[in-house]
Amino acid sequence: MFCSCKQDKVNGIIIGSDLLFAQDYSENRKLCSLINRALEKDAKAVEEITNMNCGGASGCYDLGYVLTQLITRLGEKEFIKLTIGLSKSTKNSIQGLIMAGLEYGDNEYDGKMDDKRISEVFPNLEKVLE
């Protein structure tokens, strides 16, 4: 595995080290592409990110952090639009990943959302995901 060839940041969206380590090169390329598509407001990309293999445990916290960064960048209202047609199970997965991302995901970066609940940071999205 060539870790140095993988991208750990895409258009300012940080891919945490545990998720990065759990990915092979092709998975990383796919995630990078999906992040770019999500930033272009592609709902299918959000769904695919949500369903990506995160390697379990801390890699999933990092994937949740990717989602929280996307929500912050796009804005909660815009991200909600991307979730409207998604299945209930995908919405549940998004909610779980966001909770993980808020709890642990940005500890090593800026810490602005550490240990916050979805209702504190993304209250309108929480309602849509329930």
Image (cartoon, rainbow, N blue to C red):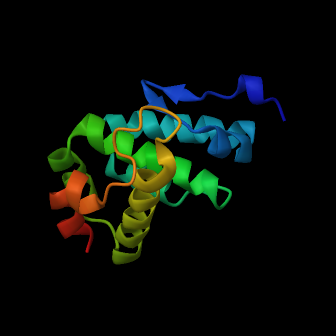
In the displayed structure, does residue 119 sit left or right of residue 64? left
> As rendered, which of 34 and 20 lies closer to the eye?
20
> As rendered, which of 84 and 92 lies closer to the eye?
92
Up-down: is 89 above or below 113? below
Q: Position of residue 20 (x, y in %)?
A: 66, 39
In the displayed structure, does residue 53 sit left or right of residue 115? right
* Quarter-of-image position of residue 6: top right
Up-down: is 18 above or below 127? above
In the displayed structure, does residue 45 sit left or right of residue 129? right
Residue shown at 41% from the left, 38% from the top: 111
> Where the C terminus falls, by quadrant?
bottom left
Residue shown at 34% from the left, 35% from the top: 39
In the displayed structure, does residue 111 sit left or right of residue 14? left
> As rendered, which of 2 and 118 lies closer to the eye?
118
Residue shown at 58% from the left, 39% from the top: 16
Q: Position of residue 25 (x, y in %)?
A: 73, 36
Residue shown at 27% from the left, 68% from the top: 129
